[in-house]
Amino acid sequence: MIRKATKADVYRVWQIRTQAILISCSSHYSQETVSSWSSAPMPDGFADVLVHHEALVFEVQNQLLAFGFVDIQQRRLEALFVTPDCAGKGYGKLIASELLLVAKRAGVKQLTLSSSLNAVKFYQGLGFVAKEETLWVHPLGFEMASVVMAKQLF
């Protein structure tokens, strides 16, 4: 089931994000980068961000397994994470499809994102096109390679 996230989901959502970084990103990033990224503390107000951007969660039998959200004003897919033991089961595609519909209904003509290196093929499978590889500077100050991607919605 896909539903809107609530403030009560915030800690499980952050766990999913952290687990996905630790497991899924280790194939494309150094241990130092993965460690720094995954250990970053949850930002103040993260629950408000989830609710404000109407984040979606995917749950099965009351277990949250994936989440994502779009920043409509910035026309960006900001986050999409699946718990590692459920990777490859289609949950990420389900959430992504719903997020694309949300953006399209809001009148977004082109949606962009900054993909981690390990997720580029996933996003290409959804019709996103890689534009350029860049260095993303995390709020804690470390840099990591990412790929700017875009998808036409209309």
Image (cartoon, rainbow, N blue to C red):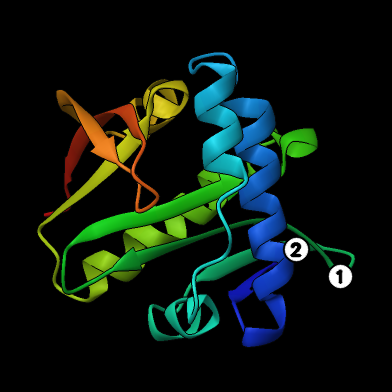
As drawn, is 29 to the left or to the right of 12? Answer: left
Give the residue displayed 40% in from the left and 50% down from the top: 140
Quadrant for residue 42, please give it: bottom right
Give the residue displayed 26% in from the left and 66% down from the top: 103
Q: Amino acid at mark 1?
A: Asn
Q: Secondary structure at mark 1?
A: loop
Q: Amino acid at mark 2?
A: Glu
Question: The C terminus lies in which quarter of the figure?
Answer: bottom left
Q: Is residue 72 above or below residue 120?
A: below
Q: Is residue 68 above or below residue 146?
A: below
> Is residue 15 among the parts visible in the rendering?
yes
Give the residue displayed 25% in from the left and 74% down from the top: 105
As drawn, is 71 to the left or to the right of 80? Answer: left
Q: Is residue 101 above or below residue 87?
A: below
Image spot of residue 26 (x, y percent): 60, 20
Which is more toward the observer, 21 or 4? 21
Q: Is residue 104 above or below residue 145?
A: below
> Mark 2 to mark 1: distance in Å?
6 Å
Quadrant for residue 119, please give it: top left
Image spot of residue 62 (x, y percent): 86, 70
Residue contact between numbered discs 2 and 1, judged by CB atoms under 8 Å: yes
Which is more toward the observer, 109 or 31? 31
Q: Secondary structure at mark 2?
A: strand
Disc 2 target residue:
59
Disc 1 target residue:
62
Question: The N terminus lies in which quarter of the figure?
Answer: bottom right
Q: Seen from this angle, which residue lies furthest front?
A: 141
> Is residue 88 among the parts visible in the rendering?
no
Which is more toward the observer, 154 or 66? 66
Give the residue displayed 55% in from the left and 51% down from the top: 40
Please tell me how crowded label 1 is: few (under 14), some (14-19), or many (20+) other residues with Cα within 10 Å: few
As drawn, is 57 to the left or to the right of 77? Answer: right
